[in-house]
Every structure is written in C-alpha cells, then in structure tokens.
Image (cartoon, rainbow, N blue to C red):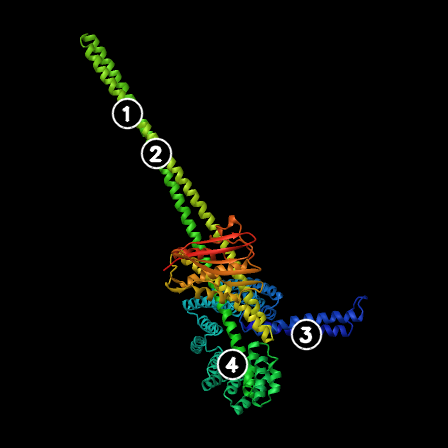
Amino acid sequence: MNNKHNNSREFPIKRLLLFLHFLVIIKHKKVSLPHPFAKDKMKRYTNILILLLLTGLFIPAGAQNNPYKIDDSLYPFFQRATKSRTYPQGLLIADTLYAEATKKKDKKAQCLALTIPVSFYYSSGNYEKLEQAATKLKEEARKNNYLQYYYSAYTSEINWLLNNGHSLRALHKAEEMKEQAFKDQHNYGIFSCIRTLGHIYYMRQNSEVAAEYYKNALEYMLKHLPEQDPSYLYMNLAEYYRKKDEGEVALEYNEKAVKTAKTNESRVASLMDKCQTLYSMDRIDDFNTCYEECLQLVEQYGVIRKSALLRLRICKLVLDKKYDQAYITADSIGSPLQIYQIRHELYLKSGNYEKAYIYNKLIHRYQDSINRLVQSADIAELNAQIGNERMKLDAKALEYKNAALNLRNTQLELDRTKSQSELEKINAENSRLVLKNRNLELARLNVEAEKQKAILKEQQSASQHYIVTLSLVLSFLFLFTCFLIFYLYRRRKTMAILQEKNGELTIARDHAEESDRMKSFFIQNMSHEIRTPLNAIVGFSSMLQEADNPEEKLQYVTIIEENNKRLLQLISDILDLSKIEAGTFDFTFEKVNAKWLCNELYQAMQMRTSPQVELRLSPDLPDLQLTSDKSRLYQVLSNFVVNALKFTSEGSITISYQIKGKEAKFSVEDTGIGIEPEKQTAVFNRFVKLNNFIPGTGLGLSICQSIITQLGGKIGVDSEPGKGSCFWFTHPLG
C-alpha cells in the first residue's frame, strides 16, 4: 500500500524533471528542428507538448483526492463524466468508465458509472430512458451489494414523476420503495423513502401529512445516519410552522438548522430561511442582524440561492418601507405564484387593501388550478389503470369462452365417436344373429333329412314346424329392420341437432368477436376522447402560467374548466355503462314536476347554445306530476339536447312533452342535418357514432335507452335527412 502511494508521488516529480530538461535543451538549441518548422509552428507544437505533459503530470495528483475510494486510475474518468452528466458526451465517458471498471473488477466504480445515464435522462426529461437506466443501476447495485445507489436510482424516478405532474404514480412507486427498504433493512433507503413521501404529500397540498413524514425522516436520520446534513429537514419543518403562523416554533427549527448545517451551502440556506421567519414575525432588528450575517456569508462563499437572496432583498425593502423599489424587484422573480404572493404582501404592508385583495384572489385561483391539474392527472392515471384491468378481464373472458367452445366441440366429437361405436356394435350383433340363423338353418335341414329318412308320416308335421320357424325368423328380421330404420332416423335427427348447435355456437363466437372488436374500437375512441380535454387542460395550464393579463388568465381558466367538465362527462358515461352491465344501475323515485324539469333544462342549456341556433321551450306545456327518478329523466333529456346542438348549425331546437292516454311523451326536435333511415335504429346501439369527427363516446343514447326501458317507457327517433330529427321517449303516468 505504501509503495503504491510512493510511486504515485514519484511519477509527477520524474515527469516534471523531464519536462524542465526538455525546455533547457530547446533553449540551448541542442535539438535540431526540421527546416519547415517556423517560429510560430515551433511555438504551437511546444504549447501542445506542454499541455500533454501537464495533463500526465496532474492526473495522478487528482487521483490521490479520491473520496469514493475507487481505483485511482478510474477516478479522473468519473470526475469528467460527472461534470458532463447533462451532456451526451457524459454518456460516452460513462461507458468508458464502466468498461474500465469491469476490467479492473471495481464494482463500486461500475455503479458510479451507471449513475451518469440516470442523471442525463433525468435532466433531459426522457422518462422511458430514465426508467431503463435506473433499472440497470438497481440491478447492478443489488448484485454488487451497493444498495445506496439502488435507492438513489429509485429516488430519481420518483422525483421525475413528482416534478412532471405524476404525483399519484410517484406515490405508488414511493410505497414500493418503502416496502423494499424495510425488507432490506437499509438505513439510507428507509430514510430516503420517508423523506420522499414527505415531498410527495407536500406537492399534493397535504402539509399535515408531509410534516409528519419530515419529522419521522429527521428522527431516523439523527438516530441511524448522523453523518448526513439535517438542516434541510429542519428548514422544511420551519416552513410548515411558518405557514401555520406559529412563528416561535418555526424559529426554533431555524436555529437548529443553522447549528447543524454541515456545508457552506446549507448554512447560507439556513440563514436565509431564518430571515424569512423573522420577517413574518415583524422582528425588524433581529431580521437586520440575520440579514447582514447572511450577506457576509454570500459574499464569502458566493451566491448559492439567487432567488432566495432576491426574496430577502424584497423583505428588507418592505421593512424599510421602500415599497416602490420592492415592486420593481418583485417583477424579476420568475414564478407567477411567487409574484402574486409578494405583491399581496407588499400591498398589504403598504395599506392598499383593494389591490391586496385582488392578488389574494389570484393566489387562490392559481392554487385551485394546480389542485385541479393534480386531480385531473390522478383521474387520468386511474382511468388508465381501469382500462388496463378491463382489457385484462375482457381477454380472460374471451379465453374462457374459447375454452368453453373447445370443450363443447370435444364433447360433440366424443358423442359422435360414441354413436359410431354403438353402430359398429349393432352391426356386429346383426352379423352374429345372421350366423346363428345360418346354423339354425343347417340344424333344421339336418333334422328334416333325418325325418325324411325315418318316417314319411311326419312330413306334414315337419312342414308345419318349418312354416312356424320361418315365420318367427321373418318376424324377427322384420322387427330388426324396423329397429334399424328407427335408429338411423334418431341418429340423423341427432346429427341435425348437433349441426344446429354448432351453428349457434358459431353465431355466438361471431357475436363475441364483434363485441371484442367494438370494445377495442371503444377503447381507442375513449383514449382519443380523454386525451383531447387532457391536452387542452395541460396546454392552457402552461399558457396560464406564462400569461400576464388577468383577463387572458380568466379566459384560460374558463377553457380549462370546460374541458374538465367534458372529461368528467366521459367518465360518468363509462361508469353508467359499467353499472348497466353489472346490474347495479339504481333509481331514486320521487314526485317530479315535468314543467319545472323542462324549464330547468332550458335554462341550463341556454349558455351552451350558439347565436345561430334558437333553443325553445314549448309554451303550452300541461301541468304534469310523475313518479320517477328526476336525475335520470334530466340525464336523458339533456343528452337529447346536447346531441341536437352537435348536429344543428342553424335553426331551432324545441323541448316539449304531451299527455297521451296513460303515458306522457317527451321530445326534443331540431332542424339539423337529420339521420338516414337505415341508421336510425343503430343510433341506440353501444359504441355507435354517426360522425367520427364529432366528440363523443357513442354511449349516450344507449344509456338513455337502458334508463327509459327500466322506467317502463319506450324510446325512438323520427328523422328525415336534411330536415332535422325528433328524439322522443314515453313515461307511464302516476
């Protein structure tokens, strides 16, 4: 071991001496250079040689400072790969490092090489590649028993999902990581997953749960990982209590963060966070003291957190009542939410409560949009999971149907084989009887010959006996022929029944295949229908962040809310369909005023009607009380109106009902494009869309038909292409 270090110190000294000797030779012209070498060229080549010698001189020296305790020759590769980890050349250096580490059998260096692709794909935003790189690192780390890199790869995946709006997937993966960490009893893994769960719940606006996780992570770190820096967890808890207006408790955590900070960066960050707490408590003198100390450290170590320092400068200007400068400085902060919060504080401190109220509303609206975006992402992920499970169930059901069909075919084949075997047995029995008859005939002839030889008187008796025997044989043959004919008739009838059953099974299989095709088409269509509002929500949310005009922001928020309603309607149709298939589609019966129900629908649909279309409510509606489910009746009528709005570009849409005998007939009539006669019966089938370019699932009218049927009524449509359509349903009175 000592020889190795001595040699590593000798090589730089030897190279330095050789380099100086070379310079002396050149200076005294002991080296003759070729004629083409001019002075500038000689200078250039001399510089290159110096660079090469210095590179060889200092690489071993850098290898001596090796905190990761890997092979000294590999550490310079790791340094270069780390500096270039966000660039493509970092991947090439990492591949070289991995190959050299494999040759030298340095397992830790192999793991370190695999951390570079994880960092690169994390920064580039390619989750698919990130997941592949993380999986490879986890496999290598577990194989080589370096589990800290296993859990660092896990944490990178979770942080990417969390920072890109996939908090639900991040939560599931964090729970997986937690289960594995406790199974391994790995201290760093347990601490990392507890801290990560705190970050997830903080991003999901659940501060209470996040604070509990931060406390548990801090306790576990202090007990099992004393070498780690706890200051950032103290700052997380200080921020939690600061938002709860518990300044004294927050200040205690700030003091602990300052005392326990183990790096210059964490100490500066701790002092900055302490200043924020003192500012919220209006402790001006203490704030100024902490602020000056913070500036001294920043000047000494450099600006580590520029945004936080800028925030402190704004706080200082506010406390000095320099509000104009504070307004100007606040505009340089990039985050819209931070700008809203700072301006709210500024206007509140300066006494401009009207503008403070406006920015407070903007803060709540921005936070609500973020919450809706998180909820939408959760719904999308849940829908994806539901869709995958449903596809698995459908595939399993189809598999069971195919198995049943194969079993039935096998049973039919067995029955056919059995019938053939029985026929062969009958043929064998017939042959045996024929042979027996032949033997009997020979015996009879022998007896007859003996009788003719013995007594002529017995000829008459013998003749009578012959006639009786012959009659019996003929009778037996006749009965056997009748039995054979009856058996063949029964067999033909059985074969006809089997052929009919086979035809029914073929039709059932065709129906199953058609149902599977329709469901596949439905899943593809639903993926498109769900993706469209989701893309609108995500896109306008991004535009909302970048917009500065409040009216423009309000417009974006309105669009996001409309697409959210559309997404919720799609999910509602899917849930109704699943309830219909499961037989759990329930109803709540009550007294329903038909005129009020139609008027409520008319008022609600006025906002969705274009200026070119007039929505009408029939003026002469009679008074009508029904015992029915109000929400289901409203659902059917609103579906009729929404469909009419889709296919009516100009003209009118009329809502009406009439009393006919013992039932009421409701109708929605439009002046739209109409429906061709051959397609009018198909509109009530599942997954049927007359126009694939108009948004919809093809489930609405099918669900309406199920509702009306269970309410005891009928549903239908009267339409003529180019003149409009009239969708109607009946409902029993009472």
Q: Which residue is mark 3?
A: 17
Dot 3 or dot 1: first in sequence order is: 3
- Per the model, the C-alpha gap separating discs 2 and 3 is 105 Å
Amino acid on which the number 3 mark rests in the picture: Leu
Q: Where does the image place residue 697, in percent across and percent down from the top left?
A: 50, 57
* Nearer to us in this view, 714 or 460: 714
Q: Dot 2: what SS?
A: helix
* Nearer to us in this view, 210 or 323: 323
Disc number lying in front (2 or 3): 2
Amino acid on which the number 1 mark rests in the picture: Leu
Which label number is shown at residue 419?
2
The answer to whether residue 383 is seen in the rendering is: no
- Per the model, the C-alpha gap separating discs 4 and 3 is 41 Å
Q: Relative to residue 415, is residue 525 depicted above or below?
A: below
Q: Where does the image place residue 22, in percent across and percent down from the top left?
A: 72, 72
- Tag 3 and tag 1, C-beta contact below 8 Å: no
- Per the model, the C-alpha gap separating discs 3 and 1 is 126 Å
* Residue 48 location, quadrant: bottom right
Dot 1 or dot 2: first in sequence order is: 2
* Nearer to us in this view, 611 or 153: 611
Residue 42 placement, left or right of 560: right
Disc number lying in front (1 or 2): 1
- Per the model, the C-alpha gap separating discs 4 and 1 is 111 Å
Dot 4 or dot 2: first in sequence order is: 4
Which label number is shown at residue 262?
4
Q: Which residue is mark 1?
A: 479
Amino acid on which the number 2 mark rests in the picture: Ser
Dot 2 or dot 3: first in sequence order is: 3
Q: Residue furthest bottom?
A: 285
